[in-house]
Image: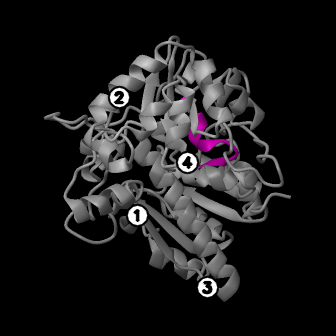
Amino acid sequence: MLPLEGVRVCDLTIAQFGAHATMMLADMGAEVIKIESPRGGDPGRGVALQPNGISPFFQAHNRGKKSITVNLRRPEGKEIVRRLAARSEVFVQSWKPGVIERLELDYEHIRAANPAIIYASATGFGPKGPRAHLAAMDMVAQAAGGFAWANSPPGAQEPNPAGPTIADQAGSLVLAYGILAAFVHRLRAGEGQQVDVSLLGSQMTMQAWNIASFFLSGEQVRGGRAGANSPIFTLYRASDGWFGIAIIDERQWPLLCQVIGQPGLADDPRFNGRAPREANRADLTAVLESAFAGRSRAEWLSAMEAHDIPCGPANSYADLASDPQVRANGYLVEVDIPGAGKLTEVGPPVALGGAPPPVRSAAPELGQHTEQVLLDLGYNWDDIASLRESRVIL
């Protein structure tokens, strides 16, 4: 039995931030019912659409869910959502501030239908302040949260955002964390509450120590290999590929010197401590680059692993598919997409009882479960026919 089996989530999220959070709840067994517009559904369905009809974007953020179509502009549509919320433990929405209030599906209205509801909002900038009413997307959050500048190399005169949508993904993790914390409170105290998680706050918390360090020292962290303060906490090129090392334990420094065949470096006054290594990082980087270029990546990793030095390959996405560590832990899964074949995607990252939970289903077709959910809510077939005829549902 999965830990969230029996928990129902009313899901009014779109795109990535909120949608991935509710998918993580579905991975853990929750019944997540995604409410979509009859006019095309979640816009994420069309992102990166492939010739076979698969959107890897939508699949990666919506597996394991049910989908119903509801016209939220119609009173009958709002009533469907209220009925569903009354029978749910969690309600999640990621609409631009102001829209959900105009639809009368905000916290106060939903709480009237279910006083114990956990009502989670995925916002751009948080519930207060001069930008609270504005929408945001990943790129805006990378910029506003300081990451785009932190990721630019030393001396760069322009910010450098990440290619992957890390702000949306970070936000989804924090949102799921907030929902689960509120759920534990509900189990203990019997009461629901409002949860707000923003892209801005999530992006900042992913850089917590770097930001704290800035306010203590005034030093801005910078990205890339050139931005690494420590030449033994960065990436190097072997004769056939790149790898990373991450030494923070001073006892591992002389071991690294032994591995590269230069034990005398350990006592070199330029390098025999964290501060001198950072002050002379260009010199040490040159020494290590020259040494590492002489052997293969596999040889270096094997030698460092034998001395318990933290290290690992610098994988491309293509490398992940053949990485035995990725495969052994089930971090990539193949999901059957009805009528379109299989999609390789990232699986649930948490092992429970020694293994990750199985992927129960692909992302749903638009409105795939509308009739099933409405019948469960007490509507009959005549009601459903009437709702469909009046275009409240698809």
Query: Of discs 4 and 2, which sits in the foreground?
Result: 2
Spatial CA span between label 1 and label 2: 54 Å
Q: Earlier in the sequence, mark 2 or mark 3?
A: 3
Q: Earlier in the sequence, mark 4 or mark 1?
A: 4
Q: Earlier in the sequence, mark 1 or mark 3?
A: 1
Residue 40, can we see it? no
Q: Earlier in the sequence, mark 1 or mark 2?
A: 1
Tag 3 residue: 191
| Quarter holding residue 317 | top right
Residues marked 4 and 3 touching at CB (< 8 Å):
no
Tag 1 residue: 100
Q: Residue at x 53, y 55 (%)?
A: 173
Tag 2 residue: 285
Around disc 3, counting alpha carbons within 10 Å, would you say few (fewer than 14), some (14 to 19), or many (20 or more)?
A: some
Residue 153 coordinates in the image, percent (x, y) = 25, 34
Compare residues 68 and 211 and report the one nearer the observer. Answer: 211
Around disc 2, counting alpha carbons within 10 Å, would you say few (fewer than 14), some (14 to 19), or many (20 or more)?
A: some
Q: Amino acid at mark 2?
A: Thr
Q: Residue furthest left?
A: 157
Q: Which mark is residue 20?
A: 4
Q: Amino acid at mark 4?
A: His
Q: Is residue 151 left or right of residue 14?
A: left
